[in-house]
Amino acid sequence: MDRHPLTAAPSRGPSRTRRWATGRTDQRVERTLGALAVTVLILIGAMLVTVFVKAWPSFSHNGLSWFGPGGDVDSQLRAMQEVKALPGHSIYYFRGWPLIWGTLLTTVSAVLIALVVSTLAAVFLTEFAPSAVRRTLDPVIRLLAGVPSVIYGLIGILVLVPFINNHLISESRRASVGYVVQLNGADVMTATLILTVMILPIMVAISANALAAVPAAWREGSLALGVNRWRTIWRVSLQTARPAIVAATVLATARALGEAVMLAMVAGGRGFAPNLLDGLTALFEPVRPLAATIFQNSEGLTIAALAHTIYAIGAVLLVSAAMLSLAGWAAKQRFKRYGVRA
Amino acid sequence: MRAHRTLTHRTLIVSAVLALALAAPASAVASKRLIIDGSTSMLPLVQKLAVAYHKAFPKIPAPKVGGGQTDIGINDVAAGRVDIGDASRDPIPGVDPEHLVFSKIARDGVCVITNSANPLPNLTQETVQGIFTGDIRDWSQVPGSSLTGPIDLFDREAVSGTQDAFQNIFLGETLKISPSATAESSEGLEVNAVGAQKSAIGFVSFAATVNGGVHTVDYQGIPCTLANAKSGQYGGVRNFWMVTKREPKGEAAKFIDWIVKPGNLTVRKIVSSLWIAIH
Amino acid sequence: MAIADLTPNAADRAPAPPRGSVIARAPRQRTTAWPLVDRVAYALCWAVGVGLCLIALAIVLFMFFKGIAYLRPHLFVESPAPSAVQSQSGGFLDPVVGTLIVAMLGIAIAMPVGVALGTWLAEYGRPAWLARAVESVIEIIAGAPSVVLALFGLLIFSQGYLGFLSQTAASGGVFGRSFFAAGAVMAVLALPLVVASTREGLTRLPDRLREASYALGRTPATTVRRVLLPAIRPDIATGGVLGLGRIIGDTAIITILLGTFLDLEKVGSVPVLGTLRGTGSTLTSYIFSNSPAGEGNAPGKAYAAAFLLLMIVLILNGIVTWLTNRDGQSDGGGLSRALRLLPLWSRLTWR
């Protein structure tokens, strides 16, 4: 059958074409798809609303001090589990600062370290590395970027935690904090290290892609003006790749924030707020970030007060993720001025 | 051609939806399988009982047994989420939800355990209390220990029945376990944790110690063995209960009656292997 | 594009050197001539780069060697043995089957919904406020931690009227945990990836394709169905594979919505539905269970399962590379292609 657009006979019979070609069908398709979009919107909107509704009692009983310090968060959770309120407080009493501090410590440190390391590594990969190294490393980095977080947790808990426990924590250090908390190798340092290793590959991949995409003319122009290679990279390539690096950072932060299982394995599992004034010992103290707390308490959702508190933690995480997306969008808007689409 | 493909697509989709719609209520009606959760110390026992129950009555599907620890099980059964809750501690009136019926099915020994590298021969009640409340913090202060260095305490979570049992039997009403202890959320995790750290000490049910990996400590001069627990010489023994909302009925009643029936040799054999049979 | 091309007057361009002659090139400036700050930065780059190479290779080789050391054929065909003797026997047949079931369920729900949503957003998108709302909601889902999604899933599937999707206790409570529940929440996880890929694919298609189709008398609906969607099949496939990667790597949803027991447990006697209503495990929860953080205490099995998971990720990566390289429509230079790939890359590992 002749299918050429100019010479083909019109498609079979008027009835068949009619069925698909009417404006009514078109409207129907658009309305169906629109209905699907509305359904998805309602479902997911309902999810968000439910999380906040179930979280409200915890916030209303504690007010803004929900985010503040005040006692041992583990014993507050324990009181909710036993349905036996702590003396002088309601059953909803909760001061989440240790969890928030743990999250901040691990996430911010990991992202800062990863930012510096990934930028330098991306520069190395695109500019200085011999092509053989680059060719081997590219698939390796992509493989690492795709590795599930539970495998990073496995490596952490089987290799890093015993190493730190046996070689880096001395008896005197253990004894110095023993009356408050037990050190066992799963702590802030391990969590930050593994988190950094986890978010590095994706940041390196994105930054390297962006650096490789800088127009050669811009680099050559800078070199022709007598600027040395490093300064060219610093002043021209990295500036051009800034939107991508910012996007990669936002991505990495969101991933680090939402990481529950891996941190439940290696961060220590205790709602403890390391005191930075302790010096180096603070690095060896256990923490339990917000997402890991939800994960570890997911069985106790039948107990009312505990359920409200867990949903409150979930609400905090959702709001943080939304604010991160907003920050990423705002950063992209700023860069749009330069005509660079990220 | 196009019409034929469209027709086949539509027929496929409609028949798939119909099959799902027909099967769903059918399967919803057919299987009323018992759902049990609660104590992690009772988990191996109840799992074995469930398998034996299904073998004895092949028409009845084996009950689905889960963990979650005692208080979660009690709350779940009070909320109607599960049929039976396993509790490894005695009922606490005023704290437990109302209208619960506890049926005793066995007794169990609770042992204090240390790492295999630290084979403590014996612990007195004072030493146990001192260690677990945090008064004694270094192994050099514990008579009989060849280790030095800070003690690593391992506790169970607040919702654990074993925790309650240990508290009542070894510490009494007033003393509380040191808040610096690491709280594990199940028997298995407690055994693993103590087995992994040289300076660790904790407590588990006797059944969890038989696979090796940890050292059981004599308490008040009596070794923590099944024979001593049965004879009553070893003091650290607690009850295992199956909890239902109001009197057990239907499938749950059948299961519990089968377990507590006097003279049921299958059940007696299973329970006596690692626990103390009382029926 | 050389600097020379920027000059407006072609006659000003330097004549090309005759063939065969030697072109004198000034030697590249030696780094020792650089100022100290630049030299330090250069050394730092090299140090970090080499360090990264070493760490990356160390991790990959470590997992490979450990995995091969512990991987045995019997692991693939045996089910996990009951808890107490975990370290001696049993395999990961049930977790592998569980992974396949969850992945298939998740993708089966996410693909049609995602493609439909992406198409609506790219081609229709009326009214505008609705389109913006849907976009924002998809963004929020993409950034939400999977634990929160799992919590919500548990809430929904524990409702009485959804009892047929899991099991019901004889006293009326709904168990709430099953493959259906896990698959549905996994679909929500994979949805943003499929939507994003479809949207990008459709917006990248040149308008002339649509105009040609309209000129031939087809309506927008037919155009989408017969012209545009087939044209972006590689993008849709990429989105699906990326979603699959994210589904396979998630542990939190599995532990919360599928339970912590490793064996596949059917509910009722209906063949396929019984398994889907029942509980089980996947490779990720199996690894978690066998690590020191779980009860299994069998690190060897965890390494073997991790190796299998890595192989699966490797294969998925290969498929994504093959799909993106097959895409011959590259209109634009290196910058636009890289920036086009950037969003796809960024979603590659969104766990």
Image (cartoon, coloured by chain):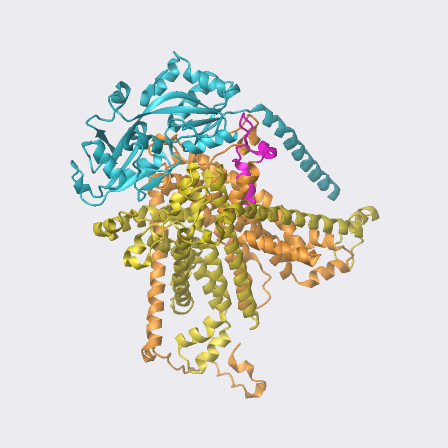
Letter of the chain in orange: C
Chain A's colour?
Answer: yellow
Quadrant of the rendered structure where residue B162 is?
Answer: top left
Instruction: Tell whether position C174 is magenta.
Output: yes
Quadrant of the rendered structure where residue B161 is?
Answer: top left
Is C230 located above or below residue A301 in the figure? below
- Residue C315 lies, in percent from the top left, at 47, 48
Regarding residue A333, the answer to whether it shows in the image is: yes
Instruction: Tell whether position A333 is magenta.
Output: no
Task: Specify the farthest residue to the top.
Answer: B263
Is C11 located above or below residue A56 in the figure? below
Residue situated in front as seen by the camera: B96 or B18: B96
Chain B's colour?
Answer: cyan
Regarding residue C238, the answer to whether it shows in the image is: no
What range of the chain is rendered magenta? C159-187
Residue situated in front as seen by the camera: A219 or B97: B97
- Residue B117 lies, in percent from the top left, at 21, 38
Left or right of A310, for residue C332:
right
Left or right of C183, for residue A265:
left
- Residue B92 lies, in percent from the top left, at 40, 28
Task: Specify the farthest residue to the right.
Answer: A14
Residue situated in front as seen by the camera: A116 or B227: B227
Residue situated in front as seen by the camera: C116 or C185: C185
- Residue B163 lies, in percent from the top left, at 34, 34
Which residue lies at the image location 34% right of the left edge and 76% below the top edge? Answer: C37
